[in-house]
Image (cartoon, helix red, strand yellow):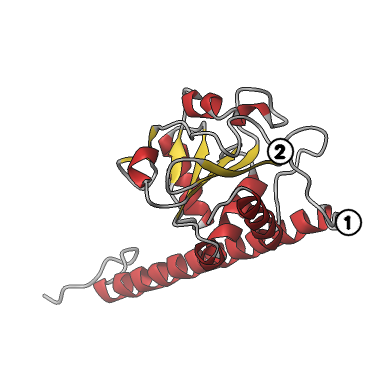
Amino acid sequence: MTSTVPPNRPSSRMRRERAKRARRRKIWIRSALGASAAVLVLLVVFLTQRHSGAKTSYPYQVGQPGPGALAPDFTLPSNMGGGFNLGSQRGKTVLLYFQEGVDCQPCWVQLQAIQHDLAGFHRAGVGEVVSITTDPLGALAQAASSYGTTIPVLSDTKLAVSRAYGANSYGMMGAGLDGHSFVLVGPSGIIEWRADYGGSPNYTMYVPVPTLLAQMRAGMASHGGS
Protein backbone atom coordinates (compact mmCIF):
# COMPACT_ATOMS: atom_id res chain seq x y z
CA MET A 1 0.00 0.00 0.00
CA THR A 2 1.17 3.53 -0.70
CA SER A 3 1.12 5.76 2.36
CA THR A 4 -0.49 9.11 1.86
CA VAL A 5 -0.62 12.27 3.96
CA PRO A 6 -4.07 12.90 5.44
CA PRO A 7 -5.78 15.69 3.50
CA ASN A 8 -5.78 18.19 6.39
CA ARG A 9 -2.34 17.32 7.74
CA PRO A 10 0.67 19.18 6.27
CA SER A 11 3.69 17.22 5.15
CA SER A 12 6.98 17.43 7.03
CA ARG A 13 8.35 19.64 4.24
CA MET A 14 5.43 22.01 4.58
CA ARG A 15 5.91 22.10 8.35
CA ARG A 16 9.58 22.98 7.92
CA GLU A 17 8.70 25.78 5.49
CA ARG A 18 6.10 27.14 7.87
CA ALA A 19 8.59 27.04 10.73
CA LYS A 20 11.12 28.95 8.63
CA ARG A 21 8.53 31.58 7.74
CA ALA A 22 7.55 31.87 11.40
CA ARG A 23 11.18 32.39 12.41
CA ARG A 24 11.61 35.03 9.71
CA ARG A 25 8.48 36.82 10.94
CA LYS A 26 9.82 36.79 14.52
CA ILE A 27 13.16 38.22 13.38
CA TRP A 28 11.38 40.91 11.36
CA ILE A 29 9.09 41.79 14.27
CA ARG A 30 12.05 42.03 16.68
CA SER A 31 13.96 44.22 14.22
CA ALA A 32 10.93 46.44 13.71
CA LEU A 33 10.39 46.78 17.46
CA GLY A 34 14.06 47.61 17.97
CA ALA A 35 13.95 50.23 15.24
CA SER A 36 10.73 51.68 16.66
CA ALA A 37 12.30 51.87 20.12
CA ALA A 38 15.33 53.70 18.71
CA VAL A 39 13.09 56.17 16.85
CA LEU A 40 11.01 56.68 20.00
CA VAL A 41 14.11 57.46 22.05
CA LEU A 42 15.31 59.99 19.46
CA LEU A 43 11.83 61.54 19.41
CA VAL A 44 11.84 61.84 23.19
CA VAL A 45 15.25 63.54 23.09
CA PHE A 46 13.98 65.92 20.42
CA LEU A 47 10.75 66.73 22.25
CA THR A 48 12.54 67.08 25.57
CA GLN A 49 15.05 69.49 24.10
CA ARG A 50 12.31 71.29 22.18
CA HIS A 51 10.23 71.57 25.34
CA SER A 52 13.12 73.38 26.97
CA GLY A 53 14.43 74.78 23.71
CA ALA A 54 13.91 78.38 24.73
CA LYS A 55 16.13 77.83 27.72
CA THR A 56 19.67 79.00 27.33
CA SER A 57 20.59 78.37 30.96
CA TYR A 58 19.81 75.59 33.37
CA PRO A 59 19.77 76.98 36.90
CA TYR A 60 20.09 74.58 39.77
CA GLN A 61 20.00 74.56 43.51
CA VAL A 62 22.75 73.19 45.74
CA GLY A 63 21.52 70.93 48.49
CA GLN A 64 23.28 69.49 51.48
CA PRO A 65 25.72 67.87 51.84
CA GLY A 66 27.30 70.19 49.31
CA PRO A 67 30.76 70.97 47.96
CA GLY A 68 33.49 70.63 50.58
CA ALA A 69 31.54 68.12 52.68
CA LEU A 70 32.46 64.47 53.10
CA ALA A 71 30.16 62.36 50.94
CA PRO A 72 28.11 59.89 53.03
CA ASP A 73 29.32 56.37 52.38
CA PHE A 74 26.84 53.77 51.20
CA THR A 75 26.39 50.36 49.62
CA LEU A 76 23.45 49.70 47.29
CA PRO A 77 22.50 46.78 45.03
CA SER A 78 23.14 47.34 41.34
CA ASN A 79 21.19 46.21 38.30
CA MET A 80 24.56 45.01 36.97
CA GLY A 81 24.75 42.48 39.81
CA GLY A 82 26.28 42.63 43.28
CA GLY A 83 26.52 45.88 45.17
CA PHE A 84 28.16 49.26 44.68
CA ASN A 85 30.10 50.69 47.61
CA LEU A 86 31.08 54.33 47.37
CA GLY A 87 33.88 54.00 49.92
CA SER A 88 35.65 51.42 47.76
CA GLN A 89 35.92 54.01 44.97
CA ARG A 90 38.49 56.15 46.82
CA GLY A 91 41.12 57.38 44.41
CA LYS A 92 38.49 57.76 41.70
CA THR A 93 36.07 60.61 40.95
CA VAL A 94 32.47 59.36 40.97
CA LEU A 95 29.41 61.12 39.58
CA LEU A 96 26.17 60.17 41.37
CA TYR A 97 23.01 60.82 39.37
CA PHE A 98 19.86 60.70 41.50
CA GLN A 99 16.69 60.47 39.39
CA GLU A 100 12.97 59.79 39.64
CA GLY A 101 13.11 56.23 38.30
CA VAL A 102 11.39 53.95 35.82
CA ASP A 103 8.38 56.20 35.13
CA CYS A 104 10.50 59.25 34.31
CA GLN A 105 11.29 58.91 30.62
CA PRO A 106 13.38 62.11 30.41
CA CYS A 107 15.51 60.77 33.29
CA TRP A 108 16.43 57.69 31.26
CA VAL A 109 17.00 59.78 28.16
CA GLN A 110 19.39 61.81 30.34
CA LEU A 111 21.18 58.59 31.25
CA GLN A 112 21.38 57.62 27.59
CA ALA A 113 22.84 61.00 26.71
CA ILE A 114 25.48 60.68 29.43
CA GLN A 115 26.33 57.20 28.21
CA HIS A 116 26.60 58.46 24.63
CA ASP A 117 29.20 61.05 25.69
CA LEU A 118 30.83 59.08 28.49
CA ALA A 119 34.23 59.89 26.98
CA GLY A 120 33.55 63.57 27.68
CA PHE A 121 32.98 62.81 31.35
CA HIS A 122 36.16 60.75 31.46
CA ARG A 123 38.09 63.66 29.93
CA ALA A 124 36.67 65.88 32.67
CA GLY A 125 38.16 63.54 35.26
CA VAL A 126 35.10 61.42 36.10
CA GLY A 127 36.10 57.80 36.57
CA GLU A 128 32.68 56.30 37.31
CA VAL A 129 29.05 57.29 36.76
CA VAL A 130 26.22 55.59 38.64
CA SER A 131 22.52 56.40 38.83
CA ILE A 132 20.38 56.01 41.94
CA THR A 133 16.60 55.60 42.12
CA THR A 134 14.10 54.31 44.66
CA ASP A 135 12.79 51.55 42.36
CA PRO A 136 13.34 47.81 42.98
CA LEU A 137 16.06 46.00 41.05
CA GLY A 138 13.69 44.04 38.81
CA ALA A 139 12.05 47.19 37.48
CA LEU A 140 15.43 48.88 37.05
CA ALA A 141 16.85 45.94 35.12
CA GLN A 142 13.86 45.98 32.78
CA ALA A 143 14.06 49.74 32.23
CA ALA A 144 17.83 49.64 31.64
CA SER A 145 17.36 46.86 29.10
CA SER A 146 14.57 48.76 27.32
CA TYR A 147 16.65 51.93 27.06
CA GLY A 148 19.91 50.12 26.31
CA THR A 149 21.77 51.76 29.18
CA THR A 150 24.89 50.12 30.56
CA ILE A 151 25.66 52.68 33.27
CA PRO A 152 24.98 50.98 36.63
CA VAL A 153 21.66 51.88 38.24
CA LEU A 154 21.39 51.39 41.99
CA SER A 155 18.26 50.55 43.96
CA ASP A 156 17.55 52.64 47.06
CA THR A 157 14.06 51.35 47.92
CA LYS A 158 14.28 52.49 51.56
CA LEU A 159 15.42 56.01 50.55
CA ALA A 160 18.29 55.73 53.03
CA VAL A 161 20.90 57.07 50.61
CA SER A 162 18.49 59.53 49.00
CA ARG A 163 17.75 61.07 52.39
CA ALA A 164 21.42 61.07 53.40
CA TYR A 165 22.10 63.20 50.32
CA GLY A 166 18.86 65.16 50.49
CA ALA A 167 18.22 64.13 46.88
CA ASN A 168 14.54 63.46 47.56
CA SER A 169 13.98 67.13 48.38
CA TYR A 170 14.31 68.37 44.80
CA GLY A 171 11.57 66.78 42.72
CA MET A 172 7.99 67.30 41.62
CA MET A 173 6.69 64.00 43.08
CA GLY A 174 7.27 64.67 46.77
CA ALA A 175 9.81 63.28 49.21
CA GLY A 176 9.13 59.66 48.23
CA LEU A 177 11.20 59.99 45.04
CA ASP A 178 14.45 61.66 44.02
CA GLY A 179 14.44 64.63 41.68
CA HIS A 180 17.19 65.26 39.13
CA SER A 181 20.37 65.70 41.16
CA PHE A 182 24.05 65.27 40.42
CA VAL A 183 26.69 64.90 43.13
CA LEU A 184 30.36 64.71 42.16
CA VAL A 185 32.49 62.88 44.73
CA GLY A 186 36.22 63.42 44.44
CA PRO A 187 39.03 60.88 44.93
CA SER A 188 39.29 61.68 48.65
CA GLY A 189 35.56 61.27 49.25
CA ILE A 190 34.89 65.02 49.35
CA ILE A 191 32.01 66.45 47.32
CA GLU A 192 33.44 68.70 44.61
CA TRP A 193 30.22 69.77 42.87
CA ARG A 194 26.50 69.39 43.32
CA ALA A 195 23.54 70.42 41.16
CA ASP A 196 19.88 69.83 42.03
CA TYR A 197 18.02 70.61 38.81
CA GLY A 198 14.69 69.01 39.64
CA GLY A 199 13.46 71.41 42.29
CA SER A 200 10.79 74.10 42.18
CA PRO A 201 10.03 76.20 40.21
CA ASN A 202 11.66 74.74 37.08
CA TYR A 203 11.47 70.99 37.80
CA THR A 204 14.08 70.33 35.12
CA MET A 205 14.21 66.64 34.20
CA TYR A 206 16.74 66.82 31.38
CA VAL A 207 19.93 68.84 30.99
CA PRO A 208 21.88 68.83 27.70
CA VAL A 209 25.18 67.06 28.24
CA PRO A 210 27.36 69.98 27.03
CA THR A 211 25.64 72.20 29.62
CA LEU A 212 25.98 69.54 32.29
CA LEU A 213 29.68 69.12 31.59
CA ALA A 214 30.33 72.87 31.48
CA GLN A 215 28.58 73.48 34.80
CA MET A 216 30.32 70.50 36.37
CA ARG A 217 33.75 71.69 35.23
CA ALA A 218 33.05 75.19 36.51
CA GLY A 219 32.00 73.80 39.87
CA MET A 220 35.06 71.59 40.10
CA ALA A 221 37.35 74.49 39.29
CA SER A 222 35.77 76.78 41.89
CA HIS A 223 36.20 74.14 44.58
CA GLY A 224 39.69 73.01 43.59
CA GLY A 225 38.59 69.76 42.01
CA SER A 226 40.20 67.71 39.26
Instruction: Please give left or right for residue 221 compared with residue 149 in the image.
Output: right
Residue corresponding to mark 2? 198
SS class, disc 2: loop
Establish if 33 lies above or below 170. below
- Packing grade of label 2 (10 A; few <14, some 14-19, many >=20) is many
Residue sitting at x 68%, y 63%: 210
Q: Position of residue 32 (x, y in %)?
A: 55, 67
**As displayed, is residue 137 above or below residue 45?**
above
- Extreme residue toward the right, this view: 54
Q: Amino acid at mark 2?
A: Gly
Q: Is residue 149 left or right of residue 65?
A: left
- Mark on residue 54? 1
Label 1: which secondary element: loop
Query: Residue at the spot x=31%, y=64% of the render?
Result: 9
> Which of the pair 125/151 is nearer the observer?
125
**Residue 64 % position (x, y):** 62, 29
Q: Nearer the viewer, residue 219 or 79?
A: 219
- Residue found at the very far front of the displayed protein: 224
Residue at 30 percent across and 41 percent down: it is: 82
Determine whether label 1 and label 2 are within 8 Å by CB.
Answer: no
Left or right of residue 90: residue 31: right
> Residue flagged by tag 1: what amino acid is it?
Ala
Q: Is residue 216 above or below residue 84?
A: below
